[in-house]
Amino acid sequence: MNGVTRTIQGLILFSTVLGVFFLWQVYLLLPAVAFYFVAVGWGLFLVDSILTFVRPRAAYYLGLTLGILALGETLSQQAHYALIMSGNLTATATLVLGSTAQAMLISLVIYYVVARRRKDPWAWPGANSQA
């Protein structure tokens, strides 16, 4: 389980670092309001990166939420598919690496939660008491 948690932390940190590069790429492409939304999303990844060292379990759930939002937004935009077809290598690499990292993050956090539940099953208070 320790390897899974380290991988989750690494993916969160990787997403934050890749986000800096992504912000640099889209600064001139997006309208100001859209860029600010993307910057706020990156700020949340930055908070999540800090949480991985302070409150890891909370960071995993926040990372899951941010990963779902980021991947959903990426896959829903037709402009991203056109970007891949255009042949711009740096933008395509950023898009593919980011999407892969988010998909792995989502998968590993779900695996972590399920494995934790199997190891320590949750029950209503008093469920084990004999009535």
Image (spheres, rainbow, N blue to C red):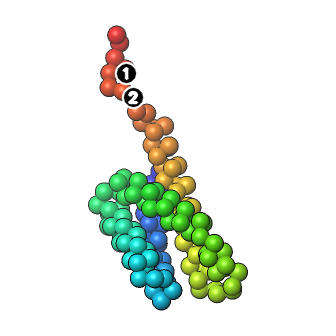
Q: Is residue 108 visible?
A: yes
Residues marked 2 and 1 touching at CB (< 8 Å): yes
Q: Position of residue 49 (x, y in %)?
A: 36, 67
Residue picked out by circle 1? 127
Q: Nearer the viewer, residue 125 or 80?
A: 80
Front-lying residue, 23 or 104: 23
What amino acid is labelled 1 in the image?
Ala
Q: Residue furthest bottom?
A: 28
* Quadrant the C terminus occupies: top left
Locate residue 7, reporting x and y percent.
48, 62
* Residue 94, horizontal then vertical, whole percent: 56, 79
- 37 or 106, which lies in front? 37
Please state which amino acid type lies under the numbered disc 2.
Ala
Residue at figure coordinates x 39%, y 28% from the top left:
123
Asked which secondary structure carries label 1, the reply is: loop
| Label 1 crowd bin: few (<14), some (14–19), many (20+), radius 10 Å | few
Residue 24, how many percent across, how many down? Answer: 46, 86
| Mark sitting on residue 123 | 2
Reply above or below: 3 against 91.
Answer: above
Q: Residue at x 40, y 78 (%)?
A: 33
What whole-number distance in Å separates the C-alpha atoms at marks 2 and 1?
Answer: 6 Å
Residue 117's tag is: none
